[in-house]
Image (cartoon, coloured by chain):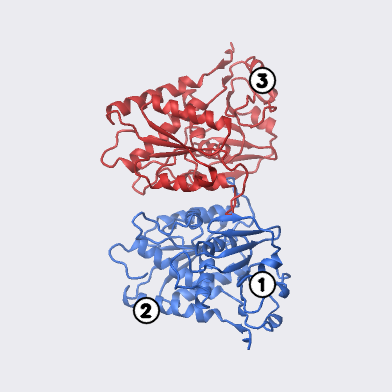
Chain colours: A blue, B red
Amino acid sequence: MSQPAVKVNATEVAAPFSAAMKEYVRTELRGIGPKLVGFLANDDESARKYAEWTGKACVRDGIRYELREVPKERLQEAVEDANRDPEVHGILVYYPCFGTFPSFYGGTMDDFIRDSISIKKDVEGLCQYYRGNLYRNIRYVDDERTQKCVLPCTPLAIVKILEHLNVYNFGQPEGEHLLGKRITIINRSDIVGRPLAAMLANDGADVYSVDINSLYLFRRGKLIECSETPAEAAKKSHVIITGVPVASYKLPLEWVSEGTVIINVASHKNVDEAALMQIPGVKYVPLVGKVTVAMLERNLMRLYENFHMKPRKMWQ
Amino acid sequence: MSQPAVKVNATEVAAPFSAAMKEYVRTELRGIGPKLVGFLANDDESARKYAEWTGKACVRDGIRYELREVPKERLQEAVEDANRDPEVHGILVYYPCFGTFPSFYGGTMDDFIRDSISIKKDVEGLCQYYRGNLYRNIRYVDDERTQKCVLPCTPLAIVKILEHLNVYNFGQPEGEHLLGKRITIINRSDIVGRPLAAMLANDGADVYSVDINSLYLFRRGKLIECSETPAEAAKKSHVIITGVPVASYKLPLEWVSEGTVIINVASHKNVDEAALMQIPGVKYVPLVGKVTVAMLERNLMRLYENFHMKPRKMWQ
C-alpha cells in the first residue's frame, strides 16, 4: 500500500543543467565560456572549501573561473573593479567576510558588499535589486520583457528540486504551478528563507515561514493572519524545508505527515535521517549544494546573455 | 568684534531654485511642466498638510500636480500603476501609510512601498537604488555619466543651505568641498541622518553621527573609531544638524561653540531659540521645508530630463 521513503541525491537534479551548460559552451560559444570571478576575503575554512568546489564545477562545465583572494579592507574596491571590468561576466563573494560587523548604512558590511555587486554580474541574485524585483514579482529587467531577472541561487535550487519531484504542476498557468500546495520553511534569512517564500508564493503556494520567534502565513505577496503552531503548519504541509544553521536542531518527526517532501538546505543535518526514512512516502533531499552550483552557472549564463552577449539569444 | 547670531529664513535659499524652475517650464517646456503624482493613503493630519503644501508649491512653479487618495490596501498597486504610466513623471508618497506594520521582506511596509517606486520617478530619491548609489558615492545612473543620480531631497536641501551659508568651499576640487569641516548630525534615520552623513562625507567632511545609543565618526564611506562624547563632538563641529522627532528634545547649548551653523530639520524645534541667539556668530536655520520642496522639484526635473525627455538637455 504505502510507498517506502526515498532519499533523493541532488546530483540527479543537477546533472542535466550541468550537461546543458557544457554543451552550450562547446557549441554556441565555441569553447570559450563566460568568466566568473570569486572573491575570498577571510580565513573561513568552509568558505574556502565552497570556493574550491564551485571553481571545480565551473571549470568542469566550461566556465572560466578565477579566485581572487583579497584582504577584507580591499574587498569593496576589488568588487567595484570587477564591476567595471568588461572581461568579467559574473561575481561571487564567499561570505562571511566581515561577519556581523555593522555597516554605517544599516545592516552588516557583508550586506553592503552583497548590494554593491553590479546587477549585470550578480550570479547569486541576492543584491537588493533582484530581491526587490522578486518581492514584487517582477520577472524581467527590461520593460520589453526580453531580459529575465536572475533569482537567488539557493532558493532557485529548491524550486528546481521541487520541479524534479513533480510538486510543481505545469498543467496550471504561470503563477499557479503551486496552487493548493502548503509549504513550511524553517528559516527566514534574507539569503534563503525570505526569497524562497516569495518565489513559492509567487507560484501560488501557501507558505508557512517559521523562525525562532514567529510563524507567518504568506500568500501572493501578503502576510495572512494565522493561528497555527509550527507543528500544525508543518503537519499539513506537502513540503517542509529546513534551514537551521545549528548542529543541535532536529526537525520533530511528529510534525511530518506521510508522503511529505523534506528538503534540508542547512549545512547541518536538521533531520534524524534513519527515523525519517521510516515514515511512508517521504521524499528526502539531504543536501542541495550541487543544485545550487548548477543554478549559479545558470544565472551566470542568463547574465551573460542579458548584458554581455548582444546580438542573439540561444539559452533560455 | 564677534558677530551677533543671525537667523536664516529658508525662503531665501529656496527662492532662486523656484524662480529657475518657473522660468524653465515657461521657456523650455512652453508652459507644460512635468507631472508629479502624490499618494495619500492615511488620515495623518500633517501628511495631508504636507501634501497640500507641496501641491501648491509645484503648481506655483509650473509643475502639474495630482493628489491621489487611495486606501492603503491599494497603495502598492496604485504606485505600480503610476510606475507604468508614461504620463506620470514623478511619484511622491506621503508617509506614514502603514506606520510600523512590518513587511514580510524585512523592514516596514512603508519601507517596502518606498523601494517600489520606479527609479525613473522617485522624486524623493529614497528608494534603495539611489540610496545604494549615494552610499557607494556613485553619482551617475549610466556608465557614460550623462544621467546624474537624484539625491534624497531633505539631505539635499541641507547641502544647499550649507552652500548658501558658504560652508562649502568651491575653490577645492569635487569631493573635497567640505575638507577640514566637522559636522555633527543628531539623527541616524534612513530618510535623513544616514544619507545626509553619506553626502557630507562624500564631499570630504568628518561627520559625527549621533543617535540615542551611539556616536560614530564617519569619513569617506568608512566608520572611524572615536572616543568623543556627543558633547565633545558637537563642541568642535562647524555645523550641527538636529533632527530629533520629539517635542521635548532640546540641544544642550553648552555643546554649541561660537560661530557654529545650526540647522533644525525636525518638525519640532530642537533648540531653545532665544538662548541660542545669544551665542555670537551662530547662524541658525530653524526650518528647512521650503528648500526640501524646491529639491523635490529639482529632482523631478532631473528625472524628467534623464528618463522622459530624450533629445536635448537644458537643465543641469
x, y (%) of residue A289?
55, 73
**Tags 1 and 2 in contact by the CB under 8 Å rule?**
no
Which residue, given by chain and number where applicable, does mark 2 sit on? A23
Q: Label 1 vs label 2: CA separation?
A: 34 Å
Taking B170 as reference, is A219 above or below it? below
Residue type highlighted by circle 2: Glu
Amino acid, disc 3: Asp
Q: Left or right of A270: which side holds A136?
A: left
The chain that hosts pointer 2 is A
**Which mark identifies residue A268?**
1
**What element does badge 1 sit on?**
loop
Q: Could you tell me if residue B264 is visible in this image?
A: yes
Chain hosting mark 1: A
Q: Tell me if residue B92 comes above or below residue A281 in the rendering.
A: above
* Left or right, residue B37 beside residue B225: left
Q: Which mark is residue B272?
A: 3
Mark 3 burial class by Cα count in 10 Å: few <14, some 14-19, many 20+: few
The residue furthest top is B1
